Amino acid sequence: MPPDPTPPRDELRFGLAYRGQSATREIAGEIAARQWGVVSRQQLIDAGLSRAAIDRRVASGRLIRLHRGVYAVGHTALRIEGHRMAAVLAGGPGAVLTDRTAGGVWAVRPDNRPRWDVTVPTAHGRKLPGITIHQRRLDPRDVTEIAGIPVTTLARTYLDLAACVPIDHTAKALERGEQLRLFDLRAVDDVLDRHPGHRGAARLRTAVDRMRPDHERLRSGLEREALALVERLRLPRPAVNAKLHGHEVDLLWTEHRLVVELDSRTYHDTAFAFETDRRRDADHVLGGYRVLRITRRRLDEDRAGVADALRTLLRPRGARRTPGRA
């Protein structure tokens, strides 16, 4: 009879166990690869590793403890995303990066603190070193992912930031979101409508109002320079920050049906401001007004041209155009 190709029972059992362990290690590695090099104890158990096997890997240094029940796989040279994911895993099911940590994730407000803000749906009764736990249930509409890491949406992040940082910091975060082309006024208004009693709601409304073009003030000196030029040219003095067609305009000559808007890149070089400025201009034109926009660069580099334009637009009807020096 030919020999039986079936291995002895003990050898078969050992081979199956070995292949199972190898597959388990591969699965654990795949999990860590998807999570910026970190994995939780529960994930390893779900992948088939026993608690004793996990402990042996911790003892040998193959798993390096970052938080209770959260490990780096093989080394601790993690990117910032790895540390963020580790904080989420430490928070448990439903954990999300929020508050100042979320502001750092969105890059609208630097966060160099040695702590992570993590929101969990239910308190688990334990403190986590290096992590500030916030217990609250988040609306699913307020949660998203960045690079695979759960984090609050930018609009919700603004709301939470407003509750824990000074209002001028919130305003700067809003402006930074504009510069990054991330700011969405409708999303912010939606969050405010859904969370009117939030501790940050009033501050966020104030900060948003400050950044709306209708409420801007050119405090940089551009407005003062324009008024000084008007005075040197002996032109009629305008109304400043006057209301017209439901908007606040920088300089207004009602008799001459002229609006002058002073554009600073700091406040106007954003997607939201670009669209809003054009809507405002259209309202004024439809109301019978001319609109002249003067930028900081033009005022610095072509002051004579600005002066000539103002003389032309403000000269009495029937008078001849007489260019002159600014």
Image (tube, rainbow, N blue to C red):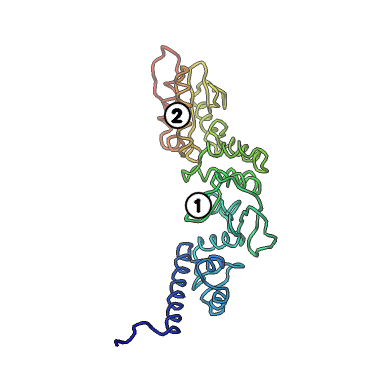
The residue type indicated by label 1 comes to Glu
Report the residue marked by disc 2: 278
Q: Nearer the viewer, residue 242 or 68?
A: 68
Q: Amino acid at mark 2?
A: Arg
The residue shown at (46%, 75%) is 21
Q: Quadrant of the N terminus?
A: bottom left
- Drawn side of residue 23 relative to residue 84, left or right: left
Q: Is residue 323 above or below residue 22?
A: above
Where 288 sits versus 11, above or below?
A: above
Q: Which residue is mark 1?
A: 145
Label 1 Cα crowd, 10 Å radius (few <14 / some 14-19 / many 20+): few
Disc count in the image?
A: 2
- Which one is in front, 20 or 264? 20
Dot in front, 1 or 2: 1
Q: Which residue does the image show at 45% across and 24% down from the upper left?
A: 282
The crowding category of the residue bearing disc 2, from other C-alpha atoms within 10 Å (few below 14, some 14 to 19, many at least 20), is few
Asked whether the viewer can see residue 195, the reply is: yes
Q: Residue furthest left?
A: 2
Q: Residue furthest top?
A: 318
User: Which comes before the other along the chain, label 1 or label 2?
Assistant: 1
Find the distance from the CA under tag 1 to the CA under tag 2. 34 Å
Task: Give the number of the disc on residue 65.
Answer: none
> In which quadrant is the C terminus drawn?
top left
